[in-house]
C-alpha cells in the first residue's frame, strides 16, 4: 500500500492512496483525514485502507484521479518526531579518513543519531531555498521508517512490529555551517534545514523480499544536474537495521505514532556505485588527491532521487532545484 498527502490548503493536507504504478490515486479522507490520523488509529483503519487500495488496483474506485493532476506534499508535512541516524559506516569512515582520523570502534556497536526539525518538511518538488550558496548546500539521499507508538525500552527483536511505513528522503545539509556548529559540542541545528520527502510512503510489504533484516535492499538512484551521481544499495552495508535504530532511540524514551527514523546517507564501499551526497565525493577526492575538487550546489542546480524496483518507482521521485531564498 502506498500512501501520500495532497495539498488541500490545510497544514497537514489530505490522505490519499496510490496505485502501485503511482499513476492513479484515490481519496482516503473518509477513512482517515490525514496520514497522521491514520497512524494514530492504525489498527482500526488499516483494513479499510487496504480494501480501498485493492479496489484501486482493480479500477473499482469511481473518484480516482491522475497523480500528475495534484500537488503532493511530504507524506507527513509535519511530524511529532524526526530522528536521523548515520547507519552507513562507509560514509563515516570516509569523512574521518579525509581529516586524518580513525573511526572509533564504538561506532560499530553504538549508533549515531541526532534529532532534527520536523515542523516543516518539504514536498518532493519544493525548491531548496537558501540565502547563500556559501553555506555549502548538499543533498543526502536516504531511507526512513515511520512508526506507530513505540514503547520505552523496546527491543530490536520487537521493533519491526512498530514500523508502519518506509519513506525516501533528501536530508538537505549546509556543509560549511557544520564544523563550527559541531565544535560547540551541542549538535546540529542551523546546518540541518528542512528535509524533503518523496511523495509516497509505503508499507514494508510493498518492498517484497527487498525488505529484510530491518533494511530496504534497494538501489537509491541520484542524479545531479541531470547526470548520474550514484546508485548505492541501501541494504547490506547498513550497519544498524531500522529495528536496531529504533531500539537505540527508545532506550530512554518512547516514540509516538508518526515518528520518523532515518538511516543516514546511503553509502557503499564499491566506488563504482557513486555516492548519495556531494560531501562523500569530496572526501574521496581529499583522500585520493589531497584536495577537494567538487563544489557544493549552486543556485539553479537540480537533484533527482528515486528508487526503482521491478521497473516501477517505489516512492515516487524527489526533484528539487536550489534557488535563492526571498522573503
Image (spheres, rainbow, N blue to C red):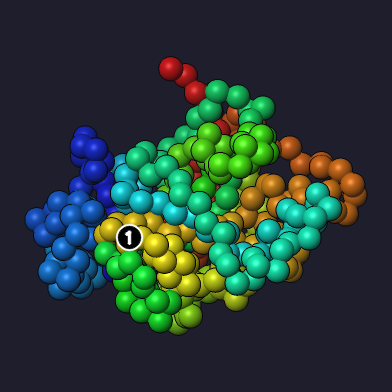
157 horizontally vs 34: left or right: right
Q: Nearer the viewer, residue 182 or 48?
A: 182
Q: x and y percent of residue 247 in the render?
A: 43, 70
User: Residue 101: which quarter of the image?
Assistant: bottom right
Q: Nearer the viewer, residue 44 or 308?
A: 44
Q: x and y percent of residue 70 in the render?
A: 28, 44
Q: What residue lies at 27% left-to-right and 64% top-to-bottom?
A: 149
Q: x and y percent of residue 137 in the render?
A: 61, 36
Q: Nearer the viewer, residue 42 or 80?
A: 80
Q: What residue lies at 56% left-to-right and 64% top-to-bottom?
A: 111
Position of residue 224 relative to residue 92, above or below, is above
Regarding residue 67, the answer to whether it shows in the image is no
Hey, which residue is sitting farthest left in the picture? 30
45 horizontally vs 315: left or right: left
The residue carrying mark 1 is 255
Q: x and y percent of residue 155 in the render?
A: 40, 76
305 horizontally vs 33: left or right: right
Position of residue 284 relative to residue 211, above or below, is above
Q: What residue lies at 75% left-to-right and 55% top-to-bottom?
A: 96
Q: What residue lies at 71% left-to-right and 63% top-to-bottom?
A: 104
Q: Which quadrant of the rendered structure holds the N terminus?
A: bottom left
Amino acid at each position: 500500500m502506498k500512501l501520500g498527502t495532497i495539498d488541500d490548503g490545510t497544514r497537514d493536507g489530505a490522505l490519499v492512496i496510490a496505485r502501485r504504478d503511482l499513476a492513479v490515486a484515490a481519496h482516503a479522507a473518509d477513512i482517515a483525514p490525514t496520514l497522521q490520523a491514520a497512524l494514530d488509529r492504525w489498527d482500526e483503519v488499516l483494513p479499510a485502507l487496504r480494501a480501498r487500495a485493492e479496489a484501486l488496483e482493480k479500477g473499482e474506485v469511481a473518484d480516482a484521479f491522475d497523480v500528475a493532476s495534484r500537488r503532493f506534499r511530504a507524506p507527513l508535512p509535519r511530524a511529532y518526531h524526526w530522528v536521523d541516524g548515520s547507519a552507513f559506516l562507509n560514509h563515516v569512515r570516509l569523512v574521518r579518513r579525509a581529516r586524518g582520523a580513525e573511526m572509533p570502534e564504538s561506532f560499530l556497536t553504538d549508533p549515531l543519531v541526532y534529532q532534527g526539525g520536523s515542523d516543516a518538511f518539504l514536498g518532493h518538488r519544493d525548491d531548496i531555498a537558501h540565502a547563500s550558496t556559501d553555506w555549502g548546500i548538499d543533498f543526502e539521499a536516504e531511507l526512513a521508517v515511520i512508526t506507530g507508538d513505540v514503547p520505552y525500552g523496546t527491543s530490536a527483536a520487537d521493533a519491526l512490529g512498530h514500523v508502519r511505513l518506509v519513506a525516501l528522503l533528501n536530508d538537505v545539509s549546509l556543509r560549511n555551517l557544520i564544523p563550527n556548529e559541531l565544535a560547540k559540542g551541542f549538535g546540529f541545528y542551523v546546518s540541518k534545514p528542512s528535509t524533503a520527502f518523496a511523495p509516497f510512503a509505503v508499507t514494508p510489504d510493498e518492498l517484497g523480499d527487498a525488505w529484510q533484516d530491518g533494511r530496504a535492499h534497494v538501489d537509491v538512484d541520484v542524479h545531479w544536474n541531470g547526470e548520474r551521481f550514484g546508485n548505492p544499495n541501501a541494504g547490506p552495508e547498513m550497519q544498524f537495521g531500522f529495528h536496531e535504530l529504533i531500539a537505540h532511540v527508545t532506550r530512554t524514551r518512547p516514540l509516538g505514532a508518526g515518528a520518523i527514523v532515518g538511516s543516514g546517507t546511503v553509502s557503499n564501499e564499491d566506488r563504482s556505485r557513486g555516492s548519495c551526497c556531494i560531501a562523500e565525493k569530496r572526501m574521496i577526492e581529499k583522500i585520493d588527491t589531497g584536495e577537494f575538487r567538487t563544489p557544493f550546489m549552486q543556485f539553479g542546480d537540480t537533484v533527482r532521487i528515486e528508487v526503482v524496483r521491478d521497473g516501477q518507482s517505489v516512492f515516487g521521485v524527489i526533484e528539487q532545484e536550489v534557488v535563492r531564498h526571498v522573503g
